[in-house]
Image (tube, helix red, strand yellow):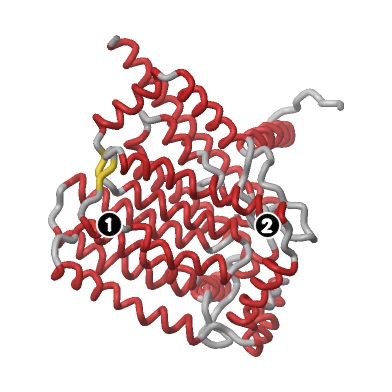
Amino acid sequence: MIKKKFNNKTVNLIISKLVLISLFFITSIYFYLNIKEGINLSPYAFNELFINYQAGFIRRGLLGEIFWNLNIFLGIEPIVFFSYLFLLLYLMQIYFFYKIFEKYKHSIFIYLLIFLSPALILFSIYDTDMYFIKDIFIKLTILFHGLVVINHMENKKDYSYYINKLKFIIIPILFFSILIHEYQVLFLSIHILLSLSFMNGKKKTLQILLIYSLLIIPVLLVLFFIGDQNQLDILNNLLQKFDVELHPQLGGGFYKALGGFYKWHFYYFGYKDFIQLLASLFFGAGIFYLVFHYCIKEKILKFHNEYQRNYIYFFTPILLCFILAIDHGRNISLLAIHLVVFYSILIIDFKKLSSLKNKIKKNFLISSALIIFLIFYIFMWKLDQMAGFGGSAQTNTIFQSSFFGELIKLIKFLYSYIDLNILDLPEIRL
């Protein structure tokens, strides 16, 4: 019996390590392809990185302003700067996920569901147009905040320790994240939800809210300086030396965004698109709600206090994303990551979790159904930029090979790389 348990733990540990190695390897390969061949340069995502303050203060301009100055003073080329930056950001994302969810490494169903989900770490890999999207900054802020909360709880540090981290690290990170992409504003309520883990009275609650009130400054800045046509024209002229043209939406602000929402969701509406959007929402975020909320109902997961019981209300501001943007795959991915990070900070009863695992193992039908579902979930669908809501002009579909497709690409890449750079391999004739 002891040997069997040991073997099960060993197998789970090996699988978890292999998954991490695969994620690091795939991320590194895409970095290599980007910097050597530029295969993933989406005109929208990559060009948006260049928005800067040379035409006056404007939303989303901080990152582009940093690059602009590095390019002038150090001569750093765009593809070099952004490729290395995003490699670092995506490796940090994998590391944060590992540190946050390593407690589930012996619950292999939950572990694989999270690490190989097309909506989480692998979202920007499966849809290469999303590789250079600024959403990664928003995702890293919630992952880092979640890790801070977990470390605080596990090490039983006092309340003042967290408050200092919130004041001097988390709030400044959120401040700069808002200036990089204003979408961060819509997810501030989830950060407040995490902070409520330490609340046991009105006095502490008011203290937390007062600290978050500092973010009113960047929020007002991005609301009042959303960009106009004059700034767009100036920036396009300045960026000609990089062969970059910004998206016209920057010159139209929220009006063009709302117009795009109407046109895309009503003028181009189709039942196939709507069904795929609902399927993407279910597989991308809904499945995590079902799994973890079930654990809450069974008291496997417990809230830190009464403040968090109505957690679902803190996610309502995120619904604005689905109005302000038409690329719902991004919205679902952002929603999913914030959802799983919140669940990760809850108190786990490992005895009850182990008991649930044993019950599932003894039930052949349920265990078989979960295995089949997991295979489908990992290998047979993906979350694309539009979440299947492609409209009449596109043929997007979410039901395509995902992780298996990446493995095939990886094998082909390794063959070509070895053949060109290391040694001659046998010629393959089809």
Q: Residue 131: where, in percent of width, then height? A: 60, 55
Image quarter hosting the C terminus: top right
- Real-space Cα distance between discs 2 and 1? 33 Å
Earlier in the chain: of badge 2 and badge 1, it is 1
Q: Label 1 crowding class (10 Å Cα cut-off): few <14, some 14-19, many 20+?
A: many
Q: Amino acid at mark 2?
A: Phe
Q: Residue 43: where, in percent of width, then height? A: 70, 65
**Picture quadrant of residue 306:** bottom left
Numbered disc 1: secondary structure = helix
Q: Nearer the viewer, residue 5 or 335?
A: 335
Residue drawn where x is 43% and y is 43% of the image:
290
**Picture quadrant of residue 110:** top left
Numbered disc 2: secondary structure = loop
Read off the residue under disc 1: 308
Image quarter hosting the N terminus: top left
19 sits to left or right of 409 = left
Residue drawn where x is 32% and y is 16% of the image:
5
Read off the residue under disc 2: 389
Q: Residue furthest right?
A: 430
